[in-house]
Image: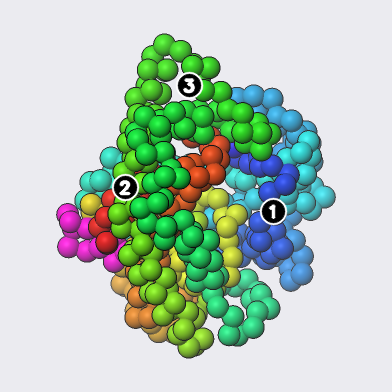
Amino acid sequence: MYRIRLAANPFYYALKVSPESQPVARWHGLADPLARAMAEPADASSDVPGGPTLDVPRGESISPPSLLNAAVADRDSLLSLNSFSSTEAPFHSGLLAVPVPTADGRWVVFEHGRQWQCIPWVEGTACTDREAMDPTAASRALLLGGEAIARVQARLSTLPEPTHPSNEIPRCLRDRMQRLQELSPWVLSGSSLRERLPNTTARWRALLERCVTGNDGSVPASELGGNVPPIHALPTGPQREAAQVGYQELAQRMMSATDCMVERGVIMHRKLVSELQQHIEQPPAHWRRAWVLRDVHREHILFSANRERVTGIIDHDAMDWDCPVVDLARWAGSFPVQLEQRSAITRLGLAVDGYNRIASANHGLGLADGAEARPFFLQSPTPEELALSETLLRLNAWVGMANWVDWIGLRRRVFFSSPESLSNRISGLIDSVCHFC
């Protein structure tokens, strides 16, 4: 991701770069209606459908802003950005940062073996690890994030529905069951699993030094062919010492995850498979679906400096037709489970409370909201959907932990991340798993 700015223009954009072989996100087929749904004037007073929006004639595209003579702040780009151009401010987008099309109408540019997307830069910062551990700060963030998710989903509700059989199982259920089945052969192997994985902290560390690199991601792992330099080839001095500490902590976390998988894996895995199967067997009428973000976690919702409002949601490449509570479970699950012991309301409960500031069981009707009356265009989660969100919260933690053990311990995959940040992420997953098992 690069931050770019128009020459002689105050507006910033994000230039997102990914390998050309990566599948094009599903939103690409809905790019024009998505841009129309999210666009709004800078002074819009409402984030829900029915509020002020840009006047776009039916069947026409929004006139694309374009970037003339754009300059990359940190390094030269491989892509000539002459096809993007505008002297106008980027559209405010109902909290969701929607990509900017090129002058010839392309939303994704394929050039030099890469995919390129240009997105209005979203000011603000994500909730930090320290804030996420503070009950007051975390509760406020969970509430505001839940409200922001509802506002975005309300706008996404104006997109055309895809053509699917009415009895098709929702994607969140299909994907999770498929992944559980893929993990089953080695998770259910019990104590013999330890023979396939590094069985000491020292062995985990040796593996991690080759699979987790501080490379900034400008060179995809596929192009390295798995040949990642060991730690002695990385920066020396204080940076190397910090990396060594990070690798040691990460190795300890991976050893803890291994112990958890060996000691509790068989029971927990079978329990979650059974729990998920019960949801799959529910009548199709319980499977309310809509366009949702599907990957809205703590790093993807940005807040103002005073933490009193959400400034935007970034990265919607995972957007798909799925159960609305998927976003709430993903958002709540990205906060430390320790909050459950420090607050009277659960992480998921706080996210749902924020969501219900915008949603209503009587959606579509004009209801009193404070001093004014306004229509609610989003339905509150039903009891069945709340039960599903609880299951997804547990599944996300279990599958997330198992994925890291699988990807690094068994497949030796390469990841571009600092060992410290990866250690924090895996620690959170382990804590969540231990909490519910």
The three-letter amino acid code for the residue at tag 1 is Pro
Q: Which residue is mark 3?
A: 231
For label 1, the crowd category at 10 Å Cα-Cα, with few meaning under 14, some 14 to 19 and many 20 or more, is few
Query: Which residue: 34% across, 25% down?
Result: 245
Query: Which residue: 22% across, 64% down?
Result: 345
Mark earlier in primary sequence (1, 3): 1
* In this view, the mark in front (1 or 3): 3
Element at label 2? helix
Between 188 and 53, the one nearer to me in the picture:
188
Kindly report the distance in space between the C-alpha atoms of the residues bearing marks 3 and 2.
Answer: 26 Å
Choose top left, top right, bottom left or bottom right for residue 224. top right
Q: What's the magenta region?
A: 340-350
Choose top left, top right, bottom left or bottom right for residue 190. bottom left
Q: Decide if residue 127 is in sight here.
A: no
The three-letter amino acid code for the residue at tag 2 is Asp
Q: Decide if residue 246 is in sight here.
A: yes
Mark earlier in primary sequence (3, 2): 3
Element at label 1? loop
Q: Could you tell me residue 86's position as x and y percent?
A: 72, 42
The three-letter amino acid code for the residue at tag 3 is Ile
Q: Quadrant of the N terminus?
A: top right
Query: Which residue: 41% across, 11% down?
Result: 237
Kindly report the distance in space between the C-alpha atoms of the residues bearing marks 2 and 1.
Answer: 35 Å
Q: Is residue 346 magenta?
A: yes
Q: Which residue is mark 1?
A: 23
Image disc number at residue 259: 2
Q: Could you tell me residue 112's position as x and y percent?
A: 78, 36
* In this view, the mark in front (2 or 1): 2
For label 3, the crowd category at 10 Å Cα-Cα, with few meaning under 14, some 14 to 19 and many 20 or more, is some
Choose top left, top right, bottom left or bottom right for residue 32. bottom right
Q: Quadrant of the C terminus?
A: bottom left
Q: Main secondary structure of the magenta part?
A: helix
